[in-house]
Amino acid sequence: MIRTEKILIYILSFVLIGVLIFITFGKDGFRNIAELRKKRDAIIETNEKIADRNRKTAGIINRLATDTEYIEHMARQELGMVKEGEIVIQFVDKKETLKNDK
């Protein structure tokens, strides 16, 4: 081979290696793309969890707006409300009473 051809092959080889290094490790290289995909997947998973929670909350809101029995159930459960004429019986744990008396 002619000497200029060898030099040209070396130069092209170095340029090719440089381009491959830049593609792999550069700002928008393969390594960065893999990191961005991981972040995207984490965001998608978070969005799915939030969407599920929103669906559940919308269901509760709908029931509170339309179902009087559910409203009564929630008032009893969350607020400890009772109907007029009902008798409330509370059981006291002896262990708790003894701890509080000490």
Image (tube, rainbow, N blue to C red):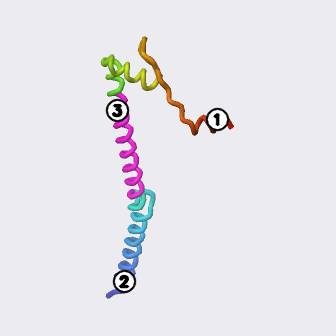
Rendered location of residue 45, percent (x, y): 37, 46
Numbered range of the magenta stretch: 33-58
Amino acid type for the residue under numbered disc 1: Asn
- Position of residue 34 measured from the top left corner of the image (x, y, whole percent): 39, 58
Q: Earlier in the sequence, mark 1 or mark 3?
A: 3
Residue that extends furthest to the bottom in the rendered view of this protein: 1
Element at label 2: helix
Instruction: Tell me the SS state at disc 1.
Output: helix
Q: Residue 33 lies in what quarter of the image?
A: bottom left
- Mark 2 residue type: Lys
Q: Which mark is residue 56?
A: 3
Residue at 37% from the left image edge and 50% from the top image edge: 41
Q: Secondary structure at mark 3?
A: helix
- Majority SS type along the magenta span: helix
Q: Which numbered tag is attached to residue 31? A: none
In the picture, the quarter occupied by the C terminus is: top right
Q: Is residue 52 magenta?
A: yes
**Residue 6's disc number:** 2
- In the image, 82 versus 74, the foreground residue is 82
Q: Residue at x 37, y 19 (%)?
A: 71
Q: Nearer the viewer, residue 95 or 1?
A: 95
- Residue in the picture at 42% in, 58% down: 32
Task: Establish if 21 lies above or below 86.
Answer: below
Q: Amino acid at mark 3?
A: Lys
